[in-house]
Image: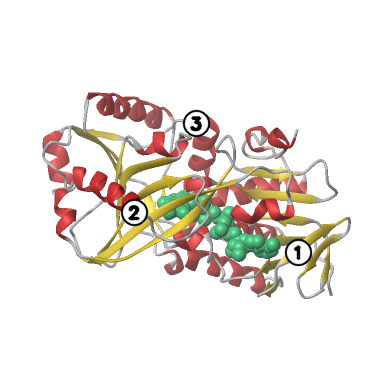
Amino acid sequence: MSSFDLIVAGAGIIGAACAQSAAEAGLRVAVVEPGAIGGGATAAGMGHLVALDDVPAEFALARHSLRLWQAWAHQPEAEFQRCGTLWVADDEAGLELLRSKAARLSAAGMIAELLDTAALRDAEPALSHDVAGGLRVPTEAVVYPPRIAHAMLTRVTALGGALHHGRRVVSLDADGACLDDGTHLSGPVLVACGCDTPALLPELLMRPRRGHLVITDRYPGWLRHQVVETGYAASAHGDAAEAVACNVQPRPGGQLLVGSSREFGRAESAISPALLARMLRRCFRFMPGLARLKALRAWTGFRPTTPDGLPYIGALPSRHDVWVAAGHEGLGVTTALGTAQLFVDLFLGRAPRLDPAPYAPLRSVA
Ligand SMILES: Cc1cc2nc3c(=O)[nH]c(=O)nc-3n(C[C@H](O)[C@H](O)[C@H](O)COP(=O)(O)OP(=O)(O)OC[C@H]3O[C@@H](n4cnc5c(N)ncnc54)[C@H](O)[C@@H]3O)c2cc1C
């Protein structure tokens, strides 16, 4: 059979989550993935589940998704660790940002605890003593995204879905998708190809945004929270050619994942030693002891970035039965479950649980 209720191109965390939600809604799903399941941006990132709150539509999608992630909290494949997020500030402007963030998170019903310097030292001894203050969001967590994508695909196939692994969608037509081995699959298509989405949908603008990460040896207990500096949101939402911000995560096995950097206009995956050094210096500013730990490996990955920073989720009105879920920049793991629910609601004509307008692909197609 080559006819499906839904054909999903791409098995990153977004395609996998959408395929799982669609299969659970009773649809017969086919997934096409040329590389490793969850092997794109999904494997390159940090897996921090965090509500960035300064862009309302992004906050709404993240908040909704965080609630849905609770269903994964006890599933071993998720490697879910509720370490909480600790936002830290190193000056008065940063403290002001912490206060407004605390107010926004609390107003949205999230727990957000402002910490003075003494409480901060108690909460996270690795922090420099001149860090001015912190904000703890204890319910946030970290997960291991590629394994989750794999678990989602296992669920899809268990529900009767078909996986075309090692195959690529090369073109779309009025009736479905053509694969690189000449196979034709009939049915509505969801393009969830991350940074590669414009290869199938050139009308959608997308820029890959390169990021560096470093992983250390194991230092159990060295860090307790995912520590993020207040400047992170400006780095994520800004349009600078190059930006760095301190963002350090304790992995369940005791390793530390150290980020973050953002660069536009860099297509190659090679490490940039100068930017990596700048990123690490920024982290040492907040955690001086980090400089004495042993780094094992560094790599880069590419965040799929739309012109306004919000993902494309929905139907492409200019095409017949073609849908998209892509462009989640640095928040695609956090927002995967809300994206999948919104997509399936729209696809089945159900009332969406979130206002879909801010994510409408048409906003940049027009
Ligand atoms: C350094 C870094 C740190 C990050 N940290 C976090 C974080 O802490 N928290 C968070 O929420 N997010 C984070 N992110 C962002 C997150 O990883 C991405 O937003 C998310 O993984 C995007 O998922 P995706 O499925 O859209 O893309 P991808 O994971 O890239 O998946 C797209 C898939 O489509 C496939 N594909 C491409 N072309 C075709 C085709 N023609 N046919 C079929 N398949 C195709 C690819 O092989 C790929 O597997 C980070 C990203 C980076 C780079």
**Residue in the image at 41% along x and 27% along y:** 107
In this picture, residue 214 sits left or right of residue 183: left
Circle 3 — which element?
A: loop
- Where residue 351 appears, x then y in whole percent? 71, 39
Where, quadrant-wise, is the C terminus in this rendering? top right
Whole-percent x and y of residue 177?
A: 80, 62
Q: Report the residue marked by disc 2.
A: 82
Q: Is mark 1 within 8 Å of ligand 1?
A: yes
Decide which of tag 2 and tag 3 comes sooner along the chain.
3
Q: Is residue 51 above or below residue 196?
A: above
Callout 3 amino acid: Val
Residue 23 visible? The answer is no
Which circle marks residue 55 in the picture? 3
- Relative to 166, does residue 320 appear above or below in the rendering? above
Circle nearer the N terminus (3, 1):
3
Between 137 and 40, the residue placed more toward the observer is: 40
Name the residue rendered at 53%, 54% in the picture.
Answer: 267
Please give the residue where the numbered disc 1 appears in the rendered image: 170
